[in-house]
């Protein structure tokens, strides 16, 4: 049964003096905020995934985090967590920001932090809760954990969705994290699918070219800050562990894995370790993806042979169930992606940016809007091209819309009104061809990793913007005066 949160401390927000130590302390804080729903008795076979879909489709605005317990067939205390940072307040708390009024607050704070941001290297320790239990070699049995079967047409049970795939570049000390899907084949073998061009895929290919298996550790229960870093495009050569710690304001404690000395979170919940084997391939997929489709076909992929499993007592699997948006992580994906794109377009020299929003409707990637103060000929086209082509905005993009500073890029009413009234399609839509796509793109044929992008200039034409008809709305002064006198009509 779902926990009744009607008497919870709605609206409570507390700035903590220190970052949360681990996922469990973070959950306590979320519970205090009144944003944790505890659900008992949901089955790993489709039910957990369907419940998450139901909740996030019915409450797209600031839904709760879902903690599944008493999963049939598994010990009490073996839990699954969905929707970690899928509300503005939880996301702000996780990133150590103050109480936000809306999503764009968090985007701006994140982008402002990036101006003098410094990653913080990990700190290695000798032990930690992750070592409370260690299964080795023949004792490894991944299905001792309640690995969910999420969508009806999935090719198997997926242990890794809200995961961290930990890999070390063979030519340097760079440790990379990525969030890639991990399907359980059997008790000690998983499939690990990584899209072409992703950092993890590039590292794997380096090992294979040297004729070596690729060492890998996969955390499937951990601090939400790490998931936020692993699921976004961080600069090549920068460790996402250090990036996440920079937002934490303190280093993360790591222990070295037994087999390969890879860093694994000392306060993590579950981490599995093994090697990606080049000469052993098995079918992986399909899987319901963030585009809202079973978009990647079944293929033969190299498997990971798991030889170690590290886990805490009463471990928690962190789950991200993708699907037709909104899903259980699209909001946080949109916020972080928007801030990264904003930071990167400004870093490329674009002036006058007022805001960026990567809409949940497009999974945080397919429909991106940038608002500018249009200041010189070609400014709006420059904004569109950069938004389309910086690293954070490039993978699997589809639409980029450029709007004036009076348009809130996160408000679809504003954006579609600007497109409808300020854009002449024959003059104001440019197409970029042969852009970076991948297997998750539902609009391309298998084996084709290119797509196209539409850049829509929905700004007033620069050459005659001062002659453009004025907007039919109350002035800010009249609107403020009216609100002060009549706000009771809005229940204020």
Image (cartoon, rainbow, N blue to C red):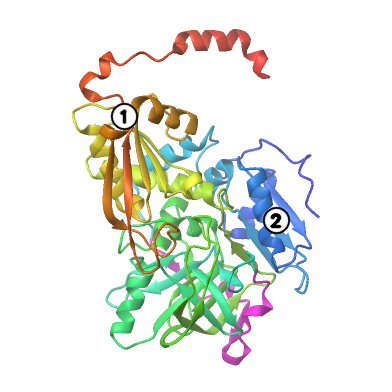
Identify which residue, 257 or 157, lies in the foreground: 157
Q: Is residue 83 magenta?
A: no
- Residue 232, given in percent of the width and then of the height, sits at 42, 56
In the drawing, does residue 211 fall left or right of residue 137?
Answer: left
Q: Quadrant of the C terminus?
A: top right
Which circle marks residue 51 in the picture?
Answer: 2
Residue at the (52%, 37%) spot, across then down: 98
The CA span between labels 2 and 1 is 43 Å
Q: Quadrant of the N terminus?
A: bottom right
Identify which residue, 455 or 121, lies in the foreground: 455
Crowding at mark 2 (Cα within 10 Å: few <14, some 14-19, many 20+): some
Quarter of the figure with residue 272: bottom right
Which circle marks residue 470 in the picture?
Answer: none
- Residue 124, given in percent of the width and then of the height, sits at 45, 70
Q: Which residues are magenta?
A: 121-148
Give the mark nearest the N terminus, 2 or 1: 2
Residue at the (68%, 51%) spot, across then down: 54
Q: Nearer the viewer, mark 2 or mark 1?
A: 1
Circle 1 residue: 424
Look at the numbered disc 2 and give the secondary structure of its residue: helix
In the drawing, does residue 302 fall left or right of residue 99?
Answer: left
Residue 48 visible, this angle: yes
- Residue 209, given in percent of the width and then of the height, sits at 28, 83
Residue 350 visible, this angle: no
- Residue 420, given in percent of the width and then of the height, sits at 40, 28
Look at the numbered disc 1 and give the secondary structure of its residue: loop
Q: Is residue 130 magenta?
A: yes
Name the residue furthest left.
377
């Amino acid at each position: 049964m779902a926990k009744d949160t009607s008497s919870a401390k709605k609206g409570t927000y507390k700035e903590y003096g220190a970052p949360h130590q681990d996922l469990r302390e973070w959950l306590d804080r979320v519970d205090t905020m009144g944003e944790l729903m505890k659900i008992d008795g949901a089955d790993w076979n489709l039910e957990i995934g369907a419940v998450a879909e139901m909740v996030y489709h019915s409450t797209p605005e600031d839904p709760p985090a879902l903690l599944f317990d008493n999963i049939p067939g598994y010990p009490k205390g073996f839990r699954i967590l969905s929707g970690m940072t899928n509300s503005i307040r939880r996301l702000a708390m996780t990133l150590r920001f103050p109480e936000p009024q809306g999503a764009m607050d968090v985007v701006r704070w994140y982008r402002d932090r990036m101006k003098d941001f410094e990653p913080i290297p990990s700190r290695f320790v000798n032990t930690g809760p992750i070592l409370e239990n260690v299964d080795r070699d023949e004792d490894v049995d991944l299905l001792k954990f309640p690995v969910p079967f999420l969508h009806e047409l999935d090719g198997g049970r997926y242990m890794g969705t809200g995961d961290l795939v930990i890999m070390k570049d063979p030519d340097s000390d760079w440790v990379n994290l990525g969030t890639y899907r991990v399907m359980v084949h059997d008790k000690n073998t998983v499939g690990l699918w990584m899209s072409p061009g992703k950092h993890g895929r590039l590292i794997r290919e380096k090992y294979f070219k040297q004729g070596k298996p690729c060492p890998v550790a996969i955390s499937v229960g951990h601090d939400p800050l790490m998931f936020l870093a692993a699921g976004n495009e961080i600069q090549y050569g920068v460790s996402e562990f250090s990036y996440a710690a920079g937002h934490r304001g303190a280093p993360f404690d790591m222990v070295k894995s037994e087999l390969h000395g890879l860093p694994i979170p000392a306060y993590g919940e579950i981490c599995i370790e093994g090697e990606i084997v080049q000469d052993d391939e098995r079918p992986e997929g399909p899987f319901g993806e963030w585009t809202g489709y079973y978009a990647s076909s079944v293929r033969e992929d190299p498997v990971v042979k798991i030889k170690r499993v590290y886990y805490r007592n009463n471990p928690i699997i962190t789950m991200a169930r993708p699907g037709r948006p909104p899903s259980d992580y699209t909001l946080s994906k949109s916020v972080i992606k928007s801030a990264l794109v904003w930071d990167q377009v400004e870093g490329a020299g674009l002036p006058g940016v007022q805001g960026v929003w990567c809409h949940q409707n497009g999974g945080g990637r397919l429909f991106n809007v940038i608002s500018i103060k249009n200041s010189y000929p070609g400014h709006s086209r420059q904004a569109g091209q950069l938004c389309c082509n910086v690293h954070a905005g490039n993978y699997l993009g589809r639409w980029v819309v450029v709007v004036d500073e009076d348009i809130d890029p996160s408000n679809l009413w504003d954006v579609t009104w600007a497109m409808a009234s300020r854009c002449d399609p024959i003059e104001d839509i440019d197409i970029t061809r042969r852009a970076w796509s991948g297997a998750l793109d539902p609009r391309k044929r298998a084996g084709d990793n290119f797509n196209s992008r539409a850049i829509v200039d929905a700004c007033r034409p620069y050459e005659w913007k001062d002659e453009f008809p004025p907007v039919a709305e109350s002035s800010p002064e009249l609107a403020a005066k009216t609100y002060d006198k009549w706000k009771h009509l809005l229940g204020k």
